[in-house]
């Protein structure tokens, strides 16, 4: 069964990037060859972009879409072999089995606990759905990865790169809340397969999980990292090492026009939602070189390419 839960599910990531671009440019954006297949989207956490872009992509393909805010439903037990005498009303075996009766594809959004690192990095929610659903599962952002976002980001970089091998800088940025590592983990994973010079910059304590950054260039000086960059991709994430804790460096890591001036006239990227004047200054977001809406637009074509491929 063909899932889409990480780049490792995709035999040829570049083909998927090119297909998303083809869908975007092509005259038959609204193809309908999976007519009347059903997509069920389960959101255990909020979403604006993923929900709308995935619904739109499915509609372009002629699919039925049923979206459920799963946080309002029965509490689901994800552990096997437990005595269910607590607050969980139903087991994922039944929930996934039942949804599979209505869905040809299931999409799941489930954020990490940011408390239990082993449980989060074991991707229990996503993997239990993969185990007990009888149809393909698409990640709408799981505990540790956000592949639909990264595919759209790869498409955006492909479209806007000023040279064959652009310098792409992923920079940590401040935030008032503890956020997942899913977006940076996934972005790094996808950028490794693209023809780019990838540099990750972050303060001490913001090291990503070693399996993602093994061969990646890490520069702790944000100013030096920005030099010559063609793309600045900003994102906050909480600590992996001091798991789930908010990182508060002494220097201000917010992306500002002064820092952008160090780059090669770089394009600014962020997956959104973004906190203005915390993560990035107004002047950077409102500059015509900012690509946030292009990224959001490309979520539709990325999702359509994935659904079509599945
Ligand atoms: C989430 C995150 O950082 O993973 C979703 C981003 C797509 N962001 C927030 O919760 C603010
Ligand atoms: N970028 C992104 O996935 O946004 P949502 O959380 O609004 O879906």
Image (tube, grey):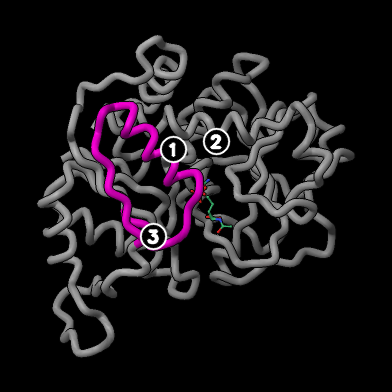
Mark 2–mark 3 CB contact (< 8 Å)? no
Mark 2–mark 1 CB contact (< 8 Å)? yes
Q: Which residue is mark 3?
A: 110
Residue numbers of the magenta segment: 42-69
Depth check: 189 or 76 in front?
A: 76
Q: Is mark 1 within 8 Å of ligand 2?
A: yes
Q: Residue furthest right?
A: 258
Q: Position of residue 71 (x, y in %)?
A: 37, 67
Q: Residue furthest bottom?
A: 85
Task: Give me the residue at 44% from left, 38% from top.
Answer: 53
- Answer left or right for 33 relative to 185: left
- Answer left or right for 183 relative to 36: right
Mark 3–mark 1 CB contact (< 8 Å)? no
Q: Secondary structure at mark 2?
A: helix
Q: Which residue is mark 2?
A: 296
Q: CA distance from mark 2 to mark 3?
A: 20 Å
Q: Which residue is mark 1?
A: 53
Task: Give me the residue at 18% from left, 72% from top.
Answer: 91
Q: Indicate the quadrant containing the N terminus: top left, top right, bottom left or bottom right.
A: top left
Q: Which of the 4 image quadrants contains residue 269? A: top right
Q: CA distance from mark 3 to mark 1?
A: 17 Å
**Of pointers 3 and 1, the one earlier in the residue sequence:** 1
Q: Position of residue 220 (x, y in %)?
A: 74, 50
Q: Position of residue 177 (x, y in %)?
A: 64, 67
> Badge 2: few (under 14), some or many (20 or more) residues near its Cα, within 10 Å?
many
Residue 111 falls within the magenta-colored stretch: no
Depth check: 225 or 68 in front?
A: 68
Q: Position of residue 88 (x, y in %)?
A: 25, 80
């Amino acid at each position: 069964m063909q899932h889409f839960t990480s780049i490792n599910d995709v035999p040829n990531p570049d083909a998927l990037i090119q297909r998303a671009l083809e869908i975007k440019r092509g005259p038959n954006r609204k193809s309908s060859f999976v007519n009347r297949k059903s997509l069920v989207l389960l959101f255990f956490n909020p979403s604006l972009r993923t929900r709308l872009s995935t619904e739109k992509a499915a509609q372009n393909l002629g699919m039925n879409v049923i979206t459920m805010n799963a946080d309002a439903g029965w509490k689901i037990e994800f552990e096997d072999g437990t005595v269910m005498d607590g607050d969980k009303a139903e087991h994922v075996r039944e929930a996934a089995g039942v949804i599979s009766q209505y869905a040809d594809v299931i999409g799941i959004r489930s954020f990490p606990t940011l408390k239990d690192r082993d449980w989060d990095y074991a991707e229990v929610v996503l993997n239990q759905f993969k185990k007990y659903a009888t149809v393909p599962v698409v990640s709408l952002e799981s505990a540790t990865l956000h592949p639909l976002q990264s595919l759209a980001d790869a498409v955006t970089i492909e479209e806007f790169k000023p040279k064959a091998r652009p310098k792409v800088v992923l920079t940590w940025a401040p935030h008032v809340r503890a956020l997942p590592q899913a977006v940076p983990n996934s972005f790094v994973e996808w950028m490794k397969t693209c023809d780019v010079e990838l540099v990750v910059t972050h303060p001490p304590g913001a090291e990503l999980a070693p399996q993602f950054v093994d061969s990646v260039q890490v520069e702790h000086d944000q100013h030096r990292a920005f030099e010559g960059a063609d793309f600045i991709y900003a994102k906050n994430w909480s600590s992996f090492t001091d798991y789930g804790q908010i990182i508060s460096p002494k220097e201000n890591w917010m992306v500002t026009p002064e820092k952008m001036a160090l780059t090669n006239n770089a394009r600014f990227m962020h997956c959104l939602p973004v906190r203005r004047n915390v993560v990035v200054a107004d002047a950077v977001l409102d500059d015509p070189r900012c690509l946030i809406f292009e990224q959001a637009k490309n979520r539709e074509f990325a999702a359509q390419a994935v659904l079509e491929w599945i």
